[in-house]
Image: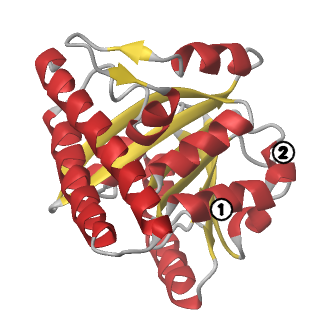
Amino acid sequence: MKLTKLSARLQQIADRLPVGCRLADIGSDHALLPVYAVQSGVALYAVAGEVNEGPYEAASRQVAEAGLNIKVHVRKGDGLAVIVKGEVDTITIAGMGGALIASILSAGADKLDGVNRLVLQPNVGEDIVRRWLLDHNWFLLEESILEEDGKIYEIITAVSEPEAAALNELLYQERKLPGGAVLTKELLLMMGPRLTQQPTNVLITKWESELDKLNKIRKSVASSNQEASREKEQQLAGLSHQLKEVLTCLQKVKP
């Protein structure tokens, strides 16, 4: 049997699935990830969830062509509505905004009983995902970042862990970097507590770009005469200064 070929992004998500898992891939698109997971023997069983008709049909075709209708169930529905409580132990949600990922997890909170791993890949709003995990006592086990076809992706892996609150408190503790810059809890939520422990060129590139965007917004806000705009400009200037300092220090500790 020929293994389904995954993009670098999907491969990194697949590499974070525990062997023997029962998987639900929410927003599965062409069901490439669940098909690969079952073909490779990593997943015993998988659900591919899709809310839109086109991707649902594409996923159904992919599963049928792979001859995996018994082990990969394609279901149409919104978020975690496609699974029943206790059916899966691992959930992947990839390729959508962080706010949407957080709302899917919140709306389906009752389905998370028995789930012990979340592998999440937000396209934007990674801080919203980290905050959701923190607020709901999921321990952030691992973060990875990659560039593919000119886009930068972050993959966040979290586990259900009895000591999550204490472990997260340690993880998000304010850190002073060599060079003097301080990574506050807010900056760690933005940039990733684990990504900043072992900064890569991709992480530096991402935040240099974010800093450029921030400075453009700051200049635009500064051109307004309103009182609220002046306050906003001061906030943005403070954040810009913090990020610049952190980036300078991270470049020094980069492996």
Looking at the image, tell me whether mark 1 or mark 2 is earlier in sequence order. Answer: 1
Is 76 displayed left or right of 128 in the figure? right
Residue 56 coordinates in the image, percent (x, y): 57, 81
Q: Nearer the viewer, residue 249 or 61?
A: 249
| Number of numbered labels in the structure image | 2
Q: Residue 15, labelled with which disc?
A: none
The N terminus: image quadrant: bottom left
The answer to whether residue 89 of the structure is visible from this angle is yes
Could you say which is closer to the camera, residue 140 or residue 74? 140
Q: Is residue 22 visible?
A: no
Residue type indicated by callout 1? Ile
x%, y% of residue 140?
55, 29
Identify residue for label 2.
86
Q: Residue at x 51, y 28 (%)?
A: 185
Quarter where residue 175 is shown: top left
Which numbered mark, 1 or 2, is in the foreground of this view? Answer: 2
Q: Quadrant of the C terminus?
A: top left
Measured as percent of width and height from the top left, residue 254 is found at: 15, 21
Please name the colour scheme applied to the rendered image. secondary structure
Q: Which residue is mark 1?
A: 70
- Badge 2 density bin: few <14, some 14–19, many ≥20, Cα 10 Å: few
On screen, residue 19 above or below 172? below
Q: Residue furthest bottom?
A: 53
Residue 153, position as x, y percentages in the image: 32, 51
Q: Residue at x 47, y 82 (%)?
A: 58
Does 42 sit left or right of 164 as displayed? left
Secondary element at image label 1: loop
Q: Identify the amino acid type marked 2.
A: Gly
Judging from the image, what secondary structure is the residue with disc 2 in?
A: loop
Q: Residue at x 76, y 55 (%)?
A: 106
In three-dimensional space, the C-alpha distance between marks 1 and 2, rounded to whole angstroms, equals 19 Å
Based on the displayed image, in which of its 4 quarters is residue 81 positioned?
A: bottom right
